[in-house]
Image (cartoon, helix red, strand yellow):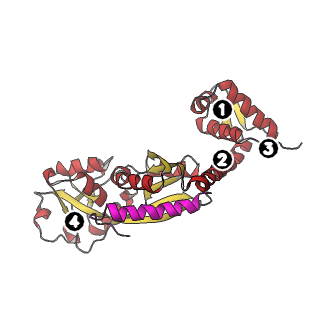
């Protein structure tokens, strides 16, 4: 039997159903009626001569055929979006709507300095920004729910490619009346035996700080892992330990009234590397590289007083 060509809409409905697991939930997300969704999925299955979805009272699950075709469906949808975006760029210059994921330890302290500039450079560009944990952002990018992510390394996958944006130092943050705050220079051995506060293990910086603590003989305060950079700052102010905070956060959120001392540790270079990442076969990859260069330019210009490296 000859296979009929599915429509893009049918593929979009199929992907949405796979992600929602229920016809009702998918229909609500798509803003259509459940009978309409059911009819479209049935038409898709009939066109392909395959059963893609197993229906039950508790919901729906993909058949082996459905699972095998899901990534292809996402790729076709992405290619069509890229086709439309490219046509729009030809007509009106670089632009379009892109879904961007950012880590909560990055977005609030970086985006206000670059989004206005991107809007000025690309008048038709629209960025839908979503904050989430790094692991979730990677999954959403791989599965096509996001087009781009701005995230600190480590972040690697054979299906993704990255463009380095900048390197951001992490600075030792201590109460201003702590004994270390009175030293003219803090040496690495001064951290031996100190309690170091860090973010939860889901954040990329956790393992970086864990390795550092092992090297220096410091202790990670595992009972007090922070859920945010604000939480780490508050715990340091309550003298529960010391921490390393990123420069962008320090620039945005810490002032002299908070009774904190921000110090360098001699001969200790600790930083996080921020990248822009996308799927390696994305049809918009040329524009994404252009966007990464524009972001670097804006960071250099608008955050020139912050100690960042390129």
Foreground disc of the pair 4, 3: 3
Do labels 4 and 2 touch, CB within 8 Å? no
Residue behind mark 4: 191
Residue behind mark 1: 60
- The image position of residue 212, as x and y in percent, is 32, 65
Do labels 4 and 3 touch, CB within 8 Å? no
Instruction: Say which label, 4 or 3, has the lower sequence index.
Output: 3
Q: Is residue 62 above or below residue 225?
A: above
Magenta stretch prevailing secondary structure: helix
Mark 4–mark 3 Cα distance, whole angstroms, equals: 65 Å
Residue behind mark 2: 77
Q: Is residue 201 above or below residue 295?
A: above
Q: Secondary structure at mark 1?
A: strand
Do labels 1 and 3 touch, CB within 8 Å? no
Image-based side of 37 in relation to 198, left or right: right
Q: Residue at x 88, y 44 (%)?
A: 2
Instruction: Say which label, 4 or 1, has the lower sequence index.
Output: 1
Quadrant location, the C terminus: bottom left
Q: Secondary structure at mark 2?
A: helix
């Amino acid at each position: 039997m000859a296979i009929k060509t599915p429509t893009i809409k049918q593929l979009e409905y199929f992907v949405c159903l796979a992600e929602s697991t229920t016809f009702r939930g998918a229909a609500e997300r798509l803003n259509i009626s459940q009978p309409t969704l059911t009819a479209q999925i049935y038409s898709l299955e009939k066109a392909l001569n395959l059963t893609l979805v197993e229906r039950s009272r508790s919901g729906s699950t993909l058949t082996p055929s459905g699972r095998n075709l899901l990534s292809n469906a996402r790729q076709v949808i992405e290619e069509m979006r890229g086709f439309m975006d490219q046509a729009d760029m030809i007509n009106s210059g670089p632009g379009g709507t892109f879904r961007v994921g950012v880590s909560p330890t990055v977005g609030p302290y970086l985006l206000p300095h670059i989004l206005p500039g991107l809007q000025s450079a690309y008048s038709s560009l629209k960025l839908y920004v979503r904050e989430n944990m790094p692991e979730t952002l990677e999954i959403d990018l791989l599965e096509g729910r996001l087009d781009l992510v701005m995230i600190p390394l480590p972040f690697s996958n054979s299906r993704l490619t990255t463009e380095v944006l900048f390197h951001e130092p992490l600075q030792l943050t201590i109460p201003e009346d702590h004994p270390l705050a009175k030293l003219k220079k803090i040496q690495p051995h001064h951290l031996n035996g100190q309690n170091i506060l860090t973010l939860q293990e889901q954040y990329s910086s956790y393992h970086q700080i864990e390795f550092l603590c092992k090297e220096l003989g410091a202790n990670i305060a595992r009972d007090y892992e922070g859920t945010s950079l604000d939480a780490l700052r508050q715990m340091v102010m309550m003298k529960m330990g010391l921490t390393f905070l990123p420069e962008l956060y320090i620039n945005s959120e810490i002032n002299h009234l908070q009774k904190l001392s921000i110090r360098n540790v001699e001969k200790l270079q600790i930083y996080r590397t921020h990248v822009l990442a996308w799927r390696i076969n994305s049809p918009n990859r040329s524009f994404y590289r252009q966007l990464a260069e524009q972001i670097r330019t804006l960071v250099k210009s608008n955050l020139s007083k912050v100690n960042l490296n390129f």
